[in-house]
Amino acid sequence: MGAVGIGAVAATIGAWPRLTGSDIPGRGSKGLSIAILGTAADAEARQGLVDEFNRLHPDIPVKIQAIQGADWRDFFTKILTMLAAGAPPDIVYVATEGTQLFAERLAYPLDEFVTRDAAQIQEYFDDVHPSLVESMMYQGSLYQLPIDWNAANIYLNSSALERAGLSRPDANWSKEDFSATLRAMQQEHGGGFTPYYWTNRLFGGVVPWLYANDTSILTESKWDGGNWFWNQFYANDTTSRNRSGGPKWLHAKADDQRVLETYEYLHSLVSEDLSVRPSTGGGNALVGLFSSGKIGTTPAGGYWAQGLHEAGMEADGFAVQYFPRWRTQRHSFGAAGYAIMRTAKDKDAAWEWVKFCASKPAMEIAIPSPTTTPARRSMVNEALYAQTGPDHWKVFYNTLDKFPDSGPIPAPPQTAEVQSALIKNTSLALGGGPKGVRPALSKLQKDLEQALRSTV
């Protein structure tokens, strides 16, 4: 999508009625049209899920539409385009980056459905950490049932640790321990090796360090409401009284002193050649570098276990640990689940798909290997990681249990603009000398203020 935000796409909607939109997939089709980010192969991989759903609901035809995109922003833009053309899907698989955007203007709340089918759906909530569910609430309503999620944990290359005379760090390791690990790795490797590699984006970028330092680029509070949900479905959970109607991000916070402190720390890693300047984009390219021993550590979620396995890495070739402690050891995460569009032709049928996909049999079909972390606690088990590793797979779900204050990446309805501002100014802050950090953060503050004033 480049520098063009979702708001810019929304501004073009008024021009769309003059177009026929006849070439948009889904126009005039019957049954449920379900949009996912991916390729035709990704859609085909869900055929088992569709077949099982149709066995249970033969009267509800289902068509999976795979929409290719560079990232979630690109995908959401294409969904808006389909909406403008008069051919929106009935259901969309939405990640945290789009949860509040969809809740604000596109998605239909699930409140009436989960209340009506409480007896059937309770088993799902008993198996899913409340933090994941809360992340998919907005202004007191629930918009998605999380299917998968990933926290920003730290992957460590076992060979790099061994060469440095180190073992897997303790769970409560600190920022200082992390720096010492990087220096020890660097000392034992020659050129072409990077102790710490990370990508410039919301997930796994600077945000995990901000959360560990008890700050963020946006002020984080919570929407009122949600008691109708928490009192019924998590009544026995000791943290339910602290739950809310969903996360709320209304103001920029890049001028916070701790944000500056965080960026200065990351800049120091770059200056010491312990870290490269962050690259923009996803982490797919890192898999080959990490598996070939060219990277010592990187932040990633449970999805990396399968990626490393497919790259030929043995189960004992890597380790995983919680993100290092700073002022806190709070983690950031992202989740995803199906959202019913307000324009869906048959919302009851759409709910049947959402409810089915949240069932354990359906999730076992959808997630047969650790390409992601299942939202269901019972599915994150030794059998899932038997072929891939890591040995310490419990870290993935224990991130939520041990650090219950962990929260979603900052993703207001204007996430596209927020992420663009973050990426651009992070590159500026870490791309030059140390004196450039503060001016870049001042620019980030202004860009975020402007982004949050924009409409979606």
Image (cartoon, rainbow, N blue to C red):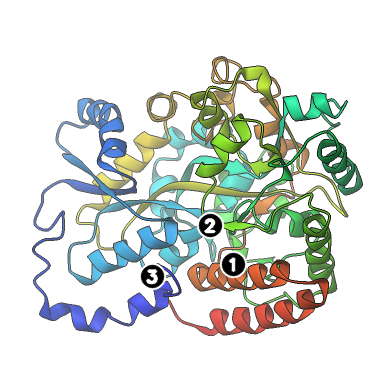
- The label shown at residue 137 is 2
Residue designated by label 1: 423
Q: Percent position (x, y) of residue 400?
A: 69, 40
Residue 256, compared with residue 228, is above or below; it is below
Query: Mark 2 or 1 closer to N-term?
Result: 2
Q: Nearer the viewer, mark 3 or mark 1?
A: 1
Q: Left or right: 212 with respect to 105?
A: right
Under circle 3, the secondary element is helix
Residue designated by label 3: 105
For the residue pair 352 and 119, the one nearer the viewer reads as 352
Residue 294, compared with residue 454, is above or below; it is above
Amino acid, disc 1: Ile
**Which residue is located at x 24 percent, y 27 percent?**
56
Amino acid, disc 3: Arg
Q: Quadrant of residue 324?
A: top right
**Which residue is located at x 71 percent, y 49 percent?**
406
